[in-house]
Image (tube, coloured by chain):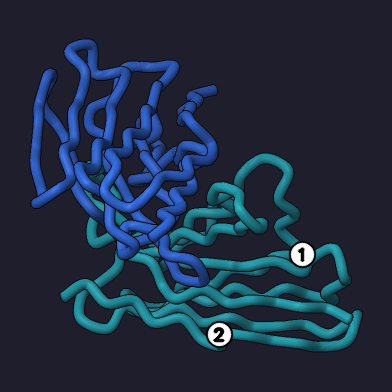
Chain colours: A cyan, B blue
């Protein structure tokens, strides 16, 4: 149980392109989804918290207009990297949690998306 | 803000040796979670500790939560090559608007030489 699917797994595109990444909870309802960015051999850096039906909460220093998050249903959240540039190249991982008000629930991670901007 | 520190950053061991990673939080935690990320993979939830002084075992892995609920450790007995990966501890963010957010430690990258 608790499977999270993330798509695509890898994207290579030109600078200026917008890239959409999908995160789906396959066998549970995810009231909260999280988007992380991870650099090689580094920890997970939380970018934003996405709650179904409401606006995402962004961490300090993360540009809202650059990283658009939509959580339209209890099983799907999307992250769109708008007008991507080489410095946006990274490993993006989503995770999902089944309850937003109960902090003890573990997070279940997608496989991640490796984004390379040329 | 809340900080979760983890040491060591890297650990190289020979297969069969033991391994320990330590996690320290700047604040008291309601619980602590441990995750493992294999090379090229995504983090996978291992365990959650809730009670002060709690000790839990999963086969060769032993997890401890400190009495003050500010530190934790993961000990692997007789490492195997399948133990290779990065081990993260994570604590929930404090505050009413945390929405289940976690603060992750920097991770310990474990390499096991056969």
Closer-to-camera residue (A23/B86): B86
Which residue is denoted by mark 1 in the rendering?
A: A66
Of the residues tagged 1 and 2, which is closer to the observer?
2
Q: In which quarter of the image is residue A31?
A: bottom left
Q: Is mark 2 on a helix, strand or loop?
A: loop
Pointer 2 local density, CA inside 10 Å: few below 14, some 14–19, many at least 20: some
In the image, is residue B114 above or below residue A14?
above
Query: Looking at the rendering, in which quadrant would you find the N terminus of chain B?
Result: top right
Closer-to-camera residue (A35/A51): A35
Marks 1 and 2 sit apart, C-alpha to C-alpha, by 20 Å
Which residue is denoted by mark 2 in the rendering?
A: A9
Residue at 25%, 53% in the rendered image: A106
- Where residue B101 appears, x then y in whole percent? 40, 44
Q: For the residues tagged 1 and 2, is the chain the same?
A: yes
Pointer 1 local density, CA inside 10 Å: few below 14, some 14–19, many at least 20: some
- Chain letter of the residue beneath label 2 in the structure image: A
Q: Does label 1 or label 2 sit earlier along the sequence?
A: 2
- Where residue B56 appears, x then y in whole percent? 9, 38
Q: Identify the disc placed on residue B108.
A: none
In the image, is residue B3 above or below residue B114?
above
In the image, is residue B16 above or below residue B51?
below
- Where residue B105 appears, x then y in whole percent? 47, 37
Query: Looking at the rendering, in which quadrant would you find the C terminus of chain B?
Result: bottom left
In the image, is residue B36 above or below residue A89?
above
Residue situated furthest top in the rendering:
B68
- Chain letter of the residue beneath label 1 in the structure image: A
Q: What element carries label 1?
A: loop
Closer-to-camera residue (B61/B5): B61
Q: Quadrant of residue A109?
A: bottom left
The image shows a total of numbered marks equal to 2
């Amino acid at each position: 149980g608790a499977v999270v699917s993330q798509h695509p797994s890898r994207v290579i595109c030109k600078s200026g392109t917008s890239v959409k990444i999908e995160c789906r909870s396959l066998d549970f309802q995810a009231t909260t989804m999280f988007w992380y960015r991870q650099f090689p051999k580094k920890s997970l850096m939380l970018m934003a918290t996405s709650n179904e039906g409401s606006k995402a909460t962004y961490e300090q220093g993360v540009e809202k207009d650059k990283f658009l998050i939509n959580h339209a249903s209890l099983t799907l959240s999307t992250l769109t990297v708008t007008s991507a540039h080489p410095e946006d190249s990274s490993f993006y991982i989503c995770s999902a949690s089944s309850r937003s008000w109960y902090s003890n629930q573990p997070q279940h991670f997608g496989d991640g998306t490796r984004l390379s901007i040329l | 803000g809340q900080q979760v520190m983890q040491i060591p950053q890297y650990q190289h061991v020979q297969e069969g040796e033991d391994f320990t990673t330590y996690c320290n939080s700047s604040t008291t935690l309601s619980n602590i979670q441990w995750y493992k990320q294999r090379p090229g993979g995504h983090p996978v939830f291992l365990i959650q500790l809730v009670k002060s002084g709690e000790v839990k075992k999963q086969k060769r892995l032993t997890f401890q939560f400190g009495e003050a609920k500010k530190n934790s450790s993961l000990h692997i007995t007789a490492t195997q090559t399948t133990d290779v990966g990065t081990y993260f501890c994570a604590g929930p963010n404090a505050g009413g608007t945390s929405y289940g957010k976690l603060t992750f430690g920097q991770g310990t990258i474990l390499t096991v030489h056969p």
